[in-house]
Amino acid sequence: MGKRQEILDSTQIDFITRQKIFFVATAMSDGSINLSPKGMDSFRIIDDQKVLWLNLTGSGNETATHLQYDKRMTIMFCAFEGKPLILRLYGKAKVFHERDSFWKDHIGLFPEIAGSRQLIEMSINLVQSSCGMGVPIMEYKEERNLLNVWAEKKGKDGLIEYMGMKNTYSLDGLPTGIFDGLP
């Protein structure tokens, strides 16, 4: 049923590129565990051991906080149509902000999306596949545009204000680092 390997193979890369949703999990040694669904056109495969995703402004910023304390991250994909499959990527991740040169060098890999908050790069150390036979078959209809519309309406200044209120501390009260190094 399941198998483990250290790198993505071409079949897995093809599977990932067809997915409309993925799930990101992070945790520190203590405190809340974060598990978040991600969508839109926000995931890129750099090579067979490195992936990158564009983190968008939301109601929290747990991933950024957790990665400051523990670089562990898991990304999961599920086949909701076609042949069943669950694919998990395990690795170590880093967070990059608009102020970082990494951002400037890599943001062009993504479409311009209002509310783009961070780039998160993960180096894969384990790829695990499992059957997924218990995952329901679901039909994809369309992307929701609500987050985009909301972020565009807020504008740059409104998003910075929102991040100041909602994205500077984790659920456990720890700093997210979102404004570190800024005047």
Image (spheres, grey):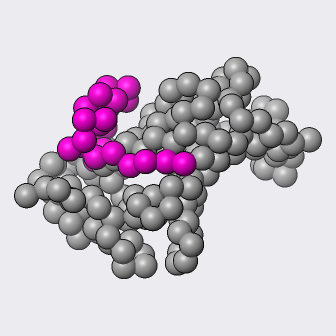
Q: Is residue 116 visible?
A: yes
Q: Residue furthest right?
A: 1
Residue 180 in the magenta stretch? The answer is no
Q: Position of residue 40 (x, y in %)?
A: 46, 39
In the rendered structure, the answer to whether residue 68 lies left or right of residue 163 reads right
Query: In the image, residue 170 lies at what x, y percent?
Result: 38, 71
Q: Is residue 110 magenta?
A: yes
In the depicted structure, whether residue 30 falls above or below residue 4: below
Residue 95's x, y, as percent?
38, 49
167 w.r.t. 182: above or below:
below
Instruction: Name the residue furthest left.
Output: 183
Q: Residue at x 37, y 42 (%)?
A: 119
Magenta-colored span: 92-116
Give the residue at x 56% y 25%: 47
Query: In terms of image quadrants, where is residue 61?
Result: bottom left
Residue positioned 82% across, 33% down in the render: 83
The residue under the point 92% across, 41% down is 1
Along the viewing direction, whichever of 72 and 2 lies nearer the viewer: 72
Looking at the image, the residue that sits furthest to the top is: 10
Of 50 and 75, the residue lying toward us: 50
In which quadrant is the C terminus drawn? bottom left
Image spot of residue 171 (x, y percent)? 42, 76
**In which quadrant of the rendered view does residue 107 lie?**
top left
Q: Quadrant of residue 54?
A: top left
Whether residue 87 is visible to the viewer of this picture, yes or no, is: no
